[in-house]
Image (cartoon, rainbow, N blue to C red):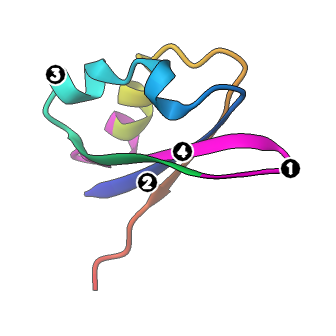
Amino acid sequence: MRFMVFVRSPVPLAALHGEALVRAGVLLDAGDLVPDACGVSGYWLIDVRDAAEALERVKRVHLPACVVEIRQVAVV
């Protein structure tokens, strides 16, 4: 299953050290979004077994002072 992980952070996503997702082989894509009034945002696209694994993988990433949203990608 694929999940989008949206991260709202005071720093660019590249500075958040998502290497754990790369090492686990679950990261499909990542990028920064255009900054808005609330700060910098970015995303990770991950491929994992289920929502529980998505949550566990994201918990392993050090995300200080970040707001995180995990959403399943619909299969079309």
- In the figure, is residue 12 to the left or right of 18? right
**Circle 1: is it few (<14), some (14-19), or many (20+) Cα within 10 Å?**
few
Q: Position of residue 44 (x, y in %)?
A: 40, 44
The residue shown at (35%, 27%) is 57
Instruction: List x then y, in percent, for residue 1.
Output: 25, 57
Q: Label 2, on which residue?
A: 4
Viewer-closest of 61 and 9: 9
Q: Are marks 4 and 3 in contact (CB under 8 Å)?
A: no
Image point (16%, 21%), residue name: 23
State the residue position of label 4.
42
Q: Earlier in the sequence, mark 4 or mark 2?
A: 2
The crowding category of the residue bearing disc 4, from other C-alpha atoms within 10 Å (few below 14, some 14 to 19, many at least 20), is many
Name the residue tied to disc 3. 23
Q: Quadrant of the C terminus?
A: bottom left
In the structure shown, which secondary structural element does the residue marked by tag 3 occupy? helix
Closest to the camera, between mark 1 and mark 2, is: 1
Q: Amino acid at mark 1?
A: Ala
Q: Which mark is residue 37?
A: 1
Which stretch did the figure color magenta? 34-53
